Every structure is written in structure tokens, then in C-alpha cells.
Image: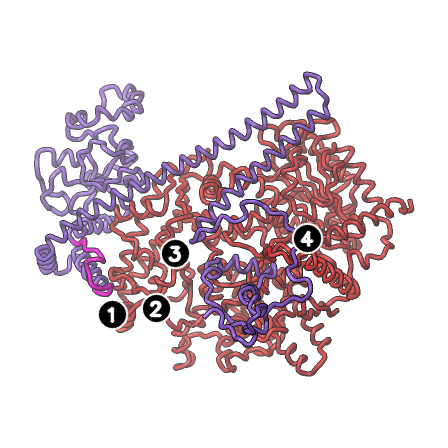
Amino acid sequence: MASNPKLAWLKGPARASSSSARPTSRAASKPGTPGPGNRPANLNGKPGTPSAYHNAIKDPSGRMVEYSNKDDKCPVCTTDRYLNPKLRLLVSPCYHKMCESCIDRLFTLGPAPCPICGKILRKSGFVAQTFEDLDVEKEVSVRRRIAREFNKKVEDFPDRKSYDDYLEEVEDITFNLINGIDIPQTEARIAAFRAANAALIEANIQRDTAAAAEQAAAEEEDRRFRTEQARMAAREEEEERAERERERRAVIDGLERGEDAEGVLRRTRAEAERRARRAQEVAAQQQRERESALTAFARPGARKEVVPDEPHIAYLDELLTGAELYTLKLAYDDPVSEAVRPEMRARWAVGGFRQAESWQRAVSCAVMGLGMGTVDDSAMEVDVGA
Amino acid sequence: MKFNIDGLPIVFPYDRIYPEQYSYMCDLKKTLDAQGHGVLEMPSGTGKTVSLLSLIVSYQQHSAHPRKLIYCSRTVPEIEKALSELQRLIKYRISQAETPEERTKEESFMGLGLTSRKNLCLHPDVSKEKKGKVVDARCRDLTNSAVCEKGRANPGSVPLCDWHEKLGEKEPGNLIPPGVYTLAEVLQYGRDEGVCPYFTIRRMMPFVDVIIYSFHYLLDPKVAEQVSKEFSKDAIVVFDEAHNIDNVCLESLSIDLTRPMLDSAARSVVKLTEKIEEIKETDASKLQDEYAKLVEGLQEANNDVPDEDAFSANPVLPDDLLKEAVPGNIRKAEHFVAFLKRFVEYLKTRMRVLHVVAETPLSFLQHLKDITYIERRPLRFCAERLQSLVRTLELSKIDEHSALQKVASFATLVATYEKGFLLILEPFETETATVPNPIFHFTCLDPSLAIKPVFERFSSVVITSGTISPLDMYPKMLQFTPVIQESYPMTLTRNCFLPLVITRGSDQVAVSSRFEVRNDPAVVRNFGSILVEYSKIVPDGIVAFFPSYLYMESIVAAWNDMGILNEVWKNKLIFVETPDANETSIALENYRRVCAPALRGVCLAHGMQACNNGRGAVMLSVARGKVSEGIDFDHNYGRAVIMFGVPYQYTQSRILRARLEYLRDAYRIRESEFLAFDAMRTAAQCVGRVLRGKTDWGLMVFADKRYARADKRAKLPRWMNQYITETASNLSTDMAIVLSKLFMRQISQNPNENQTGISLWTLEHIERRQAAEREAAEQMQVDDRGSFEPVNDAVPTLDDDDEFAASWDKFRDDELVDVPM
């Protein structure tokens, strides 16, 4: 392709990497010479890559690449990868493949018939191949068209069943278009649908765009949060390491200054203990925070100060529990205990906690004084906890 | 032996009981009473299984509404072992029954084990198949309901399985007389009666009291749906040997796809299309029927699917989703097949990328929708819909479509879960590879997802193993709240194992498998000299563990150059574990042959080369390999185990990195914390292989400088940690050898002391202990009277360990003095 083949070979890789000059060089290239260097650029599917073939499936994230195979062969000029290592096959709107040089040769001067099926094609109609199976390629392009119009959501229907029926109808239409069954009839159905739902379609398009933007934002937020977390964890670890290092240095420094080794050791141990305690506290704090977040209702700030717990016995002579004054029900309406999570309840049960006992205690506390008065109310039956 | 725990009569099939077994039973009972979950760690070889079974069976037989026991173990031999343990227990219970009613109650007790079709098949052709998948598929071809119907209506028209047919003649619910059967016995029963053992067990499952099977039947959502759905909520679930349960959970929800799989899936799609065309011409009503059913809703379509037909269940679908109807756009068979084709093509396209991609399921779904217009909802129903289609088409040889099934369950999983999963595409196998061999990993990062349904469904789940320290890690990772979390010490009359930490060689150079120094010649030489020295003094077998295959290979090569292997050869034969399972099992077999004293003579008579030696052998193996899991080196098979280095995981793996990141973000478990935990549990698992009972003895050598650190050692199980003395925690090789020699000299003395009362209890001891407990409890109550503090702090904690440690200490001192030299 160049006048000096040796030089061209030497220059090859350098030219392949310089993609900036590519569009102009291809425009200037004579028919029959493949545009050099565009394949690697398009392989990456980079966004914003200027390409003559803009109809290809757009994937700005770089998670897909153009299809290519080592056995590729252009059906028009029968060039294969052996003859032209940079062979790139593109797909026409009639789903026939041909190489770039053939496209340049045939379609640079304007619309021309497809060499395989005779349909009139333009150069701009060619797209890069994404899927290995051309049927899928075709299917996807049909779906792209359908999706633009049949974009009703489940909210637009009275119930799921009618939504499912709608989905099936759309699928039927798509299927017919793909396989070329009853094309005119199908087109008529599409037109009718479009006419009937024009406003809704427009609204849904807007809704879709909004939803996509929202999701992108959420993802971005999530990523930011994760990086932040990672950074914080790293910093925490770094701090801890620094602290340990400092302590070690302190020990060495202390020994260097000729301090008493026992004393240094004791100090270090105390320090380490303090640190461990603090770490534990922090962990406990976090645990508490999480638990209080889990528990729906706020707990009272009990146990602010620890009162020395001396055994206290109220009645030394005779313990009147008032058991004869009431009959304990099987269950009470007790919102406080019901709010306790079941697994915590199970944990208490291991410790010997019985729900009935607490009720009994509460009830007996309530009635305990009743029999003590001067009024003879011992016969009174108390109805507790209606 | 019979005794009571809090009013529950326990029948224990032995005359004596270990103290730790007693405490284990007490805690287990509390867990069951409270209907909560528990984490229990008990030293290996102290009769965990028997105490568990004996308590739970007593519990079941005592209560008016027996709760079913679901006992999950890891391997088939372990299942078989548990079954024979249960059998012995029931036999003992029958012999101990006092009244005839009790006797009949015991005799009607049923216990069965379940394993795959491959292990249970009796069909002459099918059972010869080597692969489990093929056996499953061929079995289904012979037993699914459509085939059966055809075969019964018109005998001889289609091949049927006689064993399965015979089963239909029996009364359902009474396929096998009551009792406890091991797997081998069920097989024998099937042979005698001419019925299919696999389906006998499957159909009897609602009627049994105890079912023993593998973890996967409960954890893997694809299997659990079929096998374990009928169990009631109050069933007791036990996971034995559960130290790896988090990995099992992750595996059960992860799927890897490769190029060849996608190609095969694409071929399956083509076959399905052809089949649909064919059916349309011959029997269009079938597809119409299916379509009509699907319009009605999925639940109805799948109603009353017999066991035989469920060819691959679906990954978990939430219940509300199951009630939903299949989306309209995949209702028709041809639409669904086109849908599958599109999805497979899309995945193929993704596989062509030559750089690593990591993305969340949500971003994957968005991309998929942008490119191929596949929505999330139909994707979710993919597995379900495929199953229905396969059933309608009456496909045979389903194993050929296994790749497509995998793709379908991939689709369902990716559309079902948003959090806790990551998709990773790795185009190259290794960093240096140039030929792409892409793998699309769909990895679960959150072990609690797979086990969540189990915790939600069953009121009591017990996780137990010999080595699950540190205990609080498991509730954190699996997201549950245990009511009891306990680790038991080992009571011994004499030290039967000696843990040693070697931190430096005889030349005082520190040894470590840290990446920077692991290939340092001094370290390699010192590791070698540890092996040489121990091969000189230890009789019979030695097992050595390395952190990885790669490191083992490099070190063995270096040892060969240094002549260390020649030194070892003078004393012992050397066997090496390889990644190849067959090769390893041959190595293990020969290793056992060399170490078995009874066989030595036989081998000599047969002139076997490997056994002429008779001095024992060294097995070089890898932590996390086949040898480190599930293979016991009891008694003379392993008298010493040497752990070279700390078995950290390969931290550059992308999947591990993602998992660590997730643990940090979701559960605030630090990377270093998790890695250290994982390394130490692996190390404990490895060294635990050597001690399989109280009569066994062995040396445990930890050769790495990092084991000397207290934070590392704290992560070892309590029963191991208990015996690491201060003197033995920072040794050089020569000092360790001296200690080992001393230990072996002591252990080889006749143990003429009586273990009864210390590490073995009779009924009398139990009663004495219970009386002491009661007393302590009363004491506590007296102390407590009048105070209105919550009661849960006041429960007497049994300070058995102190008591026994004290008596044990006394004994050890005596022993040291009295040993006749």
C-alpha cells in the first residue's frame, strides 16, 4: 500500500496508534485502500470516537467490543485476514457483511445496489457488527425501533394481567417484523398503536430518561460512598499502625535513656490495655448505635448511674404477695414486651426469663398493698389488666 | 447410661461420658428450649456427633410433638458415620426401654440419610455412569411422570425403571419398615425388595424423625427448593463440621460462565427451537396447554410437580414473585427461545472484551437493557420458564442442556439480587497469559444471603464443629443472633497433644512464610531442617502443610537441591499432594499403607516396593487442599503435623478483594481481621487432623514467627490454645525437638492412671455435678433475693473448666514426678 513496503512495515504500529489523523486519511484514501488504524480505536468502543458508521450499537462504557473472527472473509472481494490483517467487516441494513474497502469502493460515489441482494444502500447505512449471530443483530435493531414507541409501563394498566397481554402483543409484533410475517398488517397495527397512544409515549420517554439519570446518579453516589468508606478504613488502619509504631519507639527511647526496663514494660502494657479498652468501647458504641437503629422505639436512658445494689427485703415477718387477690391471665396486652425482637426474646429465655413472671410481678406489685388497710377489702376481687 | 438434664431423661449409649459432652448437651438443650440458634465448638474426637444425637433423640422422644431433626454433614462418609452412630443409639434405647409402650415408640423411630442418585442407583445401566449429572438425567428419562404414564398405558413402548415402578405398588408413607438405616442398608433393602432406594428415601422424608444429608440440600437454593421444602418450621437444623459454612454459602449462589458453556448453551437453544417446530406440527395442543397455564400464573403451572419431574429447581424466588404470572413477552415458547438466544448472544459479546470488568448486578441489567432490550422482569423468570418448557417438550437427556440451565439460573440470580453480588469478567486465566480464556464470574459476596432462608424458616439452627474459633465471627458473617455461643475445653488426664510454636531455626534465623522472606534460602533451609529433625524422632506418619501449591512446589524443589529430601528419605518415605484428585488419593492410599502397622507384614509378603521400608512416611500437603479437609490422620497415621507458615489466602484474587471490601462496608469486618481469621481457622483445621480422639496423641508444630503473636494465637480454638504454654510459644528448632522428645517419652508410658472422674464421668459424677449446680443456683438466689435486676445475669455460669483445670493440673504434676524412666 505504500511505495516502500519495508518502511510501511516499520511505520505500521506507529500509524495504528495515531487515530487522530484517521478520519481525514480515510476520506482521502482512494477506493481499494482500507482506512488504516480505525480498527483498534473502534474495538475499544470509546465514546466520541468519530466514525462514519454511527448506526452501530452505542456502548459508552466499553463493556462490549465489535465482533471479529480470525476466519473472517469478505464475501464480495474474498479478502481474508491472511491477506489483510486489518480486515474489518461491516453490516449493511440488509444484513450482509462486507469489508471496508469494498464499501469505500462501491458506495463513496453515492447510493448503489448491494452486491449480494441488490437493495439500494448508502455508505452511512453500514454498521459495525456487535453480535456473532446476524439474526440477533437484526432482532436488536427491530427491538430498538419498537421500544421507542411501545414503552407503556405497568402503571399504565389497570392490572398485571392486561399488562402481560400487552407485553405479549408487543412481542408478537416484534416477532412478525423479525421473521417477515404479515408485514403490512403489522405495520398497520404499529401505526394504530402510535396514533392511539401518542401522548403517553411522549410522557414515557421523558420518564425513562429521568429514571436512567436517577439510576446513574444513585450509582455515582454509591461509588462515592464506597470510596469514602475505603479511604476511611485505610486511614483508620494507618493511624493504628502509626500508634503502634510510636509506642514501640517510646519503649526503645525509654530504654535508651536508661529508664528502668520493668517500668517501661509496665507503662507499655497499661497503654496497650487502655487502647484495647478504648477500641472495645468504640465497637460497643457502634453496636449500640446499630441496635438502637434497629429497635423501633427509643429506649429510656436507663442506668445512668450505678446505685450500689444492697439486698433489700421489704417485709421481714411475712411475705404478702397478694396472690389470693387476683388470678393471673394467660396473656396480657403488653406493647413493651411485644416490641422486643423475637431473637432477643429467645436469648432471654436461655437466661431463664419468663414473660409470665414479669406480669405476675407487676400484678402482685399492684395489689400488694390492698389487704393492708384498715378497711376490710380483702374480699375484694381485683380485675387486673382488662 | 441414663440421666436427667433439667428434667429431660437422656439415654446415652455408653457407660461413661466426657465432661465436655455433658456441658455440650446442657447448652444444646437450652438452645432447643429457647427455640434459638447456637454456635458450639467442641474439640474434635470427643464424641460430638453421639452427644448431639443422643440429646436430640431424647428430646424428640420425650416431647409430645416431636420436632424433626435435620442433620447436615459435609461428605458421604461422614453421613454414613453419623447414621451408624444413630443406629447404635436407637438400638441401645430399645434395649433400655422399660415399658412395652416405650419400646414400640423407640422401635418406630425412623432415621434416614440422603445422598445423590449416583450413590443410590440400582438400575444396571444407569448406575454404571460415572458422572453424577448423567446419572440424574438418565434417571429422569426413565422416571418422569410423562414417560411413566406412557409406559403404563402401553407397556414396552418406552423404557421404564423397574425399581421405580415397584415403588408405586407399595403403600405411600410405608415404603420401608421403621428403623434407622445407613445408606448401605437402604441399598441392600432396595436390592432385596426390588425398589429404588433413592425415591424410597425421598418419599419417606416427610415421615422420618431424623434426616441426615449434605449441606447443599439445605443451603443451595437450587436443590433446597426441591428437597427440603416440606420440613416444618419447628424442625431442628444442625450443621456439623460447619467451619467452612460461609464458603459453602457463597459457592451455592455463585455461577461461573465460560466460552465453551455459552457455545453449548447456544447449541441447546437451536435444539429447543427445532423441537418446538416439531411439536407444533405433531402435537400443538401441548404447547397451547402450557401457554394457557402460564397465562393463568406460574404457581398453577408448577403445581404438583412430582419429585421425578423437577429437573433443576430454580434459584430462590421470593414467595410473592412465585405468585406472580410469567411476563407476557416470554409466555409463548418461540418468544422465550428467542429471548434465550438474545441473552446468550449478549453474554458472548461481553466475553470478547480483553480487559477486566467488575460491575454490580444493577449496572449489568442496565447495560443489558440498553443493548438488547431485555427487561429485568422476564429475566427473573428465566429458570422457571425454562423448566416449564422442558417439561412440556418432554425432553430426554437433559444433561446435554446443562449449560443452558446454568445460563438460565444465572439470569434469574442476576435479576433477583441487587446487593451482595458482583459480576467480574476475567479475560485471562493468569496475569501473564496471552491467550484469552474468559470467565464471567457471578459471585456472591455475602454468605448470609444463602443461609438467611434457613435461619428464617427454622427456629433452632445449631452450627457446630471442632474448629470454629473465633466464635463471634460466624454470627457476624452469617447475620444471625445466637442464643448460645460456646467453646468447650478438652479435659484430659494427661497431655495427649503438644502444640509447639517454632519461630526460628537452630541458627536463630526467624522462619516465616511472609511474602518477602519466603524464598530466602535461610528460611527454606530452616523449614527443611525442621522436617529432617522431626523425621528422625517421630515414629510412623508425619503430615506437613504448606500455604499453597505454588509455595510447596518451589520449596520442595529447593529442598531437593539442598539435599534435604535425601536426608528425610533416610528416615521416611515422602508423598506429595497434587491438585489432581486422583493422584492425591493414590498418594494417600500408599501413605496409609506405609503407616499401617497391621499391613506392613502383608505388604512385605507381597514384596510391595513402597512398604519394604516400614518406618512411616511424610505427607506433604497443602492447606485448603483435599488432605486438609475431611481426611483424618488418626493414631499412627499422623503422629506429628507441621504447619509451615501461616496459610493466608491469595489476596490478589479479584473475587477475594471484592469480598473483603463487601465485608468491610456491610459488616465492618476489617480486611486484616478477616484474613487473619481465615488463615487461623485453616491452620487449626489442618493441625486438628492429627488428633481424632482422647486415646490418640500427636505433636502439633506451628512453624512461623507470626504464630508467636498473641492476637494470632487468640484466634485458635480454645481447646488448642489451652495447651500452648508460655514456654512452647516461642521456640527454636532444637528446643522444640527437645520438648518433643520429652513429650514422646512421657506419652509412651503406660497410662495406668484412672481417667474416671476427670475426663470420663459415670452417672455418679453427673449427679454430683448437678447437685453442685443446684446448690450454686440456690446460693445465687439467696444472694439475689430482693434485688429487682433482670434475671439473665443471675444464671449460674458453670465454671466447670476451672474445676477440671484444677484437678487436671494436680494430675499433671503428679505425673511428671511419678513417671518411671
Q: CA distance from mark 2 to mark 3?
A: 18 Å
Q: Is residue B659 magenta?
A: no
Give me the residue at 22% from left, 49% from top.
A140
Residue numbers of the magenta segment: A150-162
The location of residue B247, given as percent across then percent down, is: 52, 50
**Which chain gets the purple colouring?**
A
Q: Nearer the viewer, mark 1 or mark 2?
A: 2
- Of the image marks 2 and 3, the number of the one nearer the N terminus: 2
Q: Amino acid at mark 2?
A: Gln
Whole-angstrom CA distance, mark 1 to mark 3, is 30 Å
In this view, the mark in front (4 or 1)? 4
Name the image quarter holding residue A121: top left
Query: Residue under circle 1?
Result: B281
Is disc 1 in contact with disc 2, using a CB cutoff of under 8 Å? no
Q: What is the C-alpha distance between the residues marked 1 and 2?
A: 28 Å
SS state under label 1: helix
Camera-side residue: B782 or A59?
Answer: B782
* Three-letter residue code for mark 1: Glu
Q: Which mark is residue B299?
A: 2
Mark with earlier residue (4, 3): 3
Q: Residues within 10 Å of mark 2 (few under 14, many from 20)?
A: some
Q: Secondary structure at mark 3?
A: helix
SS class, disc 2: helix
